Amino acid sequence: MGKSSVDLTHHFLIAMPNMADPHFAKSLTYVCEHTDQGALGIVVNKPIDMTLSKLFEQINIPLADAGLREAAVHYGGPVQIDRGFVLHRPVGSWHSTLAINEELGLTTSKDVLEAVGRGDGPDQVLVTLGYAGWTAGQLEQELGQNAWLTVKAEPGVIFDLPAADRLPAAMRLLGIDFSMLSEDVGHA
């Protein structure tokens, strides 16, 4: 696979306020892979009404770590929404991991969840159902239509902040106050 002319791997896509697609309105998406074949990303700021303990129950894996039990599963995007994706650091060595860089991986195999359940999984995990996918040239086209702002990703935004704070934090990486972008700016 050749490199795309714009490689947005390990970048955040910040949905512009005019984003019409309800899957991505007010979303912050982390791009895991971007080549001339297309792109794959995970929405990282849309927790769904399901905790990790509930998900682990459904797949029959015990979850030992009490701190993780109440962590929210996230909506990762509109593709394969019945499938779990684990964004994690460190990369580690799991059965089917897309190594995004030296630090971060995206794993779809169950072994990473089993390890999380035992308490010897990656230090930091974000579990999503589904992912976001773009065909060849599609993301570039959307960028050309100003659908997204992009900024180099900072993993701490994903792993160290509550979901509601991730989009504003990514905006700050760009030096933009998110409230300034809103379509209906109030007048003082």
Image (cartoon, rainbow, N blue to C red):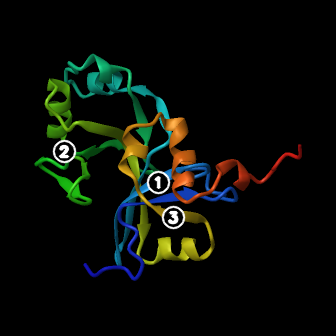
Which residue is under mark 3? 150
Q: Nearer the viewer, residue 142 or 100?
A: 100
- Single out the residue that lies furthest toward the right: 188
| First in sequence: mark 3 vs mark 1 | 1
Work out how far the residue at label 3 is from the one at label 1, CA to CA, in angstroms: 10 Å
At label 2, which amino acid type do we have? Ser
Amino acid type at mark 1: Thr
Q: Is residue 80 visible?
A: no
Tell me where residue 110 appears, x and y as whole percent.
18, 39
Mark 2 = which residue? 109
Amino acid marked by disc 3? Thr
- The image position of residue 151, as x and y in percent, is 48, 62
In the drawing, does residue 153 fall left or right of residue 166? left
Tell me which label, 2 or 3, sits earlier in the chain: 2
As drawn, 29 above or below 58: below
Please tell me which residue is depicted at 35% across the width and 65% down the height of the picture.
9
Q: Is residue 160 above or below residue 58?
A: below
Q: Secondary structure at mark 3?
A: strand
Can you tell which mark lies on residue 29?
A: 1
Can residue 71 be seen in the rendering of this structure? yes
In 3D space, how far apart are the residues under numbered discs 2 and 3 (Cα atoms)? 29 Å
Q: Is residue 186 left or right of residue 116?
A: right
Quarter of the figure with the N terminus: bottom left
x, y (%) of residue 56? Answer: 27, 26
In this rendering, which labeled residue sits more in front, label 1 or label 2?
1
In this view, the residue in front, 8 or 154, is 154
Which of the pair 144/132 is nearer the observer?
144
Q: How crowded is the residue under tag 2: few (<14 C-alpha within 10 Å), some, or many (20+)?
A: some
